[in-house]
Image (tube, grey):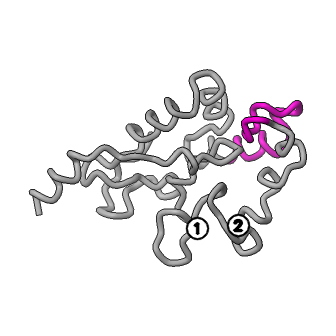
């Protein structure tokens, strides 16, 4: 068992840049993405938007977002809109994460650097898995080592 832990820690968590939603959510950390039952493929990878949660998402389906080159909300003329401010407040309060900060980091430093930082922050120190943003622990080993 210990050998498996050591081997998994040798691997660096790699979060797919396609898992970063237009609002700045890292779908790779979401309970819907991490769970096996009723798995969500992430906002940008959902093939059937009618069945996926993002099919109903006001932000994902925003007409202003469709006009942006980057396909991220930070490029919108109305950024941050009321819906983004509400979402950001909810996630700051409940999960200690700011989507507005995420988007500013992406805008300033680029998506590649943002994803690399997210991979370091959200990797479980016990098993090398991913800390779930909604549970604040690793769903694989249940270690509570999430972002504080």
Residue placed at 66% from the left, 26% from the top?
A: 107
Residue for point 77% across, 53% down: 60
Question: Where 11 falls versus 107 (above or below)?
Answer: below
Image quadrant in which the N terminus is located: bottom left
20 with respect to 90 (left or right): left
Image x and y of residue 31, in percent: 52, 62
At 9% from the left and 57% from the top, the residue drawn is 3
Snapshot quadrant of residue 127: bottom left
Over which residues does the magenta segment extend?
Answer: 69-90
Q: Can you say whether 134 is above or below 11 in the image?
A: below
Which one is earlier in the sequence, the residue at label 2 or at label 1? 1
Left or right: residue 142 versus residue 20 is left
Which image quarter holds the C terminus? top left
Q: Confirm or deny contact between disc 2 and disc 1 (CB under 8 A).
A: yes
Counting from the top left corner in percent of width and height, residue 123 is at 36, 46
- Residue at the spot of label 1: 40
Viewer-closest of 42 and 96: 42
Residue 88 place in picture, x, y as percent: 70, 41
Tell me if mark 1 has few (under 14), some (14-19) or many (20+) residues whose alpha carbon lies within 10 angstroms of its own.
Answer: many
In the rendered image, residue 84 lying in the magenta stretch gets the answer yes
The label number, if any, that marks residue 53 in the structure image = 2
């Amino acid at each position: 068992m210990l050998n498996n832990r050591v081997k998994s820690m040798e691997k660096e968590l790699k979060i797919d840049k396609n898992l970063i939603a237009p609002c700045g959510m890292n779908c790779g950390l979401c309970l819907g993405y991490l769970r096996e039952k009723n798995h969500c493929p992430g906002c940008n990878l959902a093939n059937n938007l009618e069945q996926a949660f993002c099919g109903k998402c006001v932000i994902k389906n925003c007409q202003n977002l469709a006009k942006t080159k980057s396909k991220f909300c930070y490029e919108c003329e109305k950024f941050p809109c009321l819906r983004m401010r509400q979402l950001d407040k909810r996630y700051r309060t409940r999960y200690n994460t700011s989507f507005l900060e995420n988007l500013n980091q992406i805008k300033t430093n680029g998506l590649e650097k943002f994803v690399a930082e997210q991979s370091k922050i959200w990797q479980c120190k016990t098993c090398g898995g991913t800390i779930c943003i909604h549970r604040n622990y690793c769903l694989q080993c249940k270690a509570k080592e999430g972002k504080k």
